[in-house]
Image: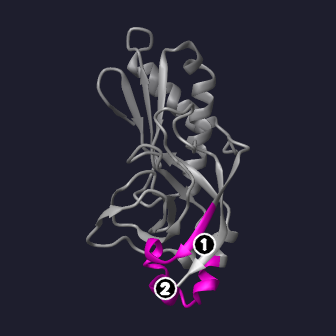
């Protein structure tokens, strides 16, 4: 636990290696905080990768009390699903948008169709949303499909590109630099500043990738 200014504390139970069980407990904590203090407009929760930032009004809640409450919740909360939504994303694998697919299949000891089948048959969970608007860090990638990020990021990975980085899956919500590996593309819109809600994903959502085609 550490202070983050006068009105925020950071709970960071992670060990440096992403742990899905830890993330599930933090998801449950965030949901409980939002359902209680958050409804009063006096608190905000920012969920990170294996950490949680609790922002509050120090005139209403003393930082020591905030820290004690987070530790109490961490000790007592029950890890459980916080969302019943299952979002399906149609994907065309391979081609120019998925230029790493062949190499990743070879590295995994699979055919391209075998890699795509394993990727699309898995059910993913949104661990948190961050790094760029609408970007979801997803757990649930089959271990044999994991791949390290590139040492030199590409400068313009296009919006909708389906990607893998380490043991996590994701989709680019906008065109931006990324060192993640490229598998294909979806036409789904992940972020729209004029929509409500602006982000397609929320922490705890489950995601399925649906095969719409495989390009050479």
The residue nearer to you, when weighing 188 against 18, is: 188
Residue 95: x and y, percent? Answer: 48, 78
Q: Which of marks 1 and 2 is in front?
A: 2
Instruction: In the rendered view, tell whether residue 43 sits above or below residue 116.
Output: above
Instruction: In the rendered view, tell whether residue 22 sits above or below residue 208.
Output: above
Q: Residues within 10 Å of mark 2 (few under 14, many from 20)?
A: some
Determine the CA span between mark 1 and mark 2. Answer: 17 Å
Return the residue at label 1.
Answer: 142
Q: Residue at x 60, y 48 (%)?
A: 24
Return the residue at label 2.
Answer: 102
Q: Which residue is drawn at 62% across and 45% down?
A: 204
Image mark count:
2
Q: Residue at x 70, y 45 (%)?
A: 81
Query: The residue tagged with tag 1: helix, strand or loop?
Result: loop
The residue nearer to you, when weighing 205 against 183, is: 183
Residue 21: x and y, percent? Answer: 60, 54
| Quadrant for the N terminus in the image | top left
Residue 198 — which label? none
Q: What stretch is highlighted in magenta?
A: 90-116
């Amino acid at each position: 636990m550490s202070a983050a200014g006068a009105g925020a504390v950071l709970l960071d139970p992670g060990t440096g290696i992403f742990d899905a069980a830890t993330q599930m407990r933090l998801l449950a904590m965030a949901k409980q905080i939002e359902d209680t203090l958050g409804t009063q407009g006096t608190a905000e929760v920012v969920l990170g990768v294996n950490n949680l930032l609790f922002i509050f009004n120090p005139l209403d809640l003393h930082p020591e009390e905030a820290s004690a409450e987070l530790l109490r919740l961490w000790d007592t909360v029950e890890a459980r699903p916080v969302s019943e939504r299952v979002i399906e994303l149609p994907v065309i694998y391979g081609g120019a948008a998925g230029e790493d697919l062949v190499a990743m299949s070879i590295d995994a000891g699979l055919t391209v169709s075998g890699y795509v089948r394993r990727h699309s048959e898995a059910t993913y969970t949104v661990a948190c949303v961050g790094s760029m608007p609408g970007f979801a860090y997803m757990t649930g990638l089959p271990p044999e499909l994991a791949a390290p990020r590139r040492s030199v990021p590409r400068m313009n990975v296009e919006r909708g590109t389906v990607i893998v980085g380490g043991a996590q899956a994701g989709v680019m919500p906008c065109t931006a630099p990324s060192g993640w590996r490229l598998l294909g593309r979806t036409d789904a819109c992940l972020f729209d500043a004029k929509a409500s809600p602006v982000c397609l994903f929320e922490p705890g959502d489950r995601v399925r990738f649906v095969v719409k085609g495989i390009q050479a």
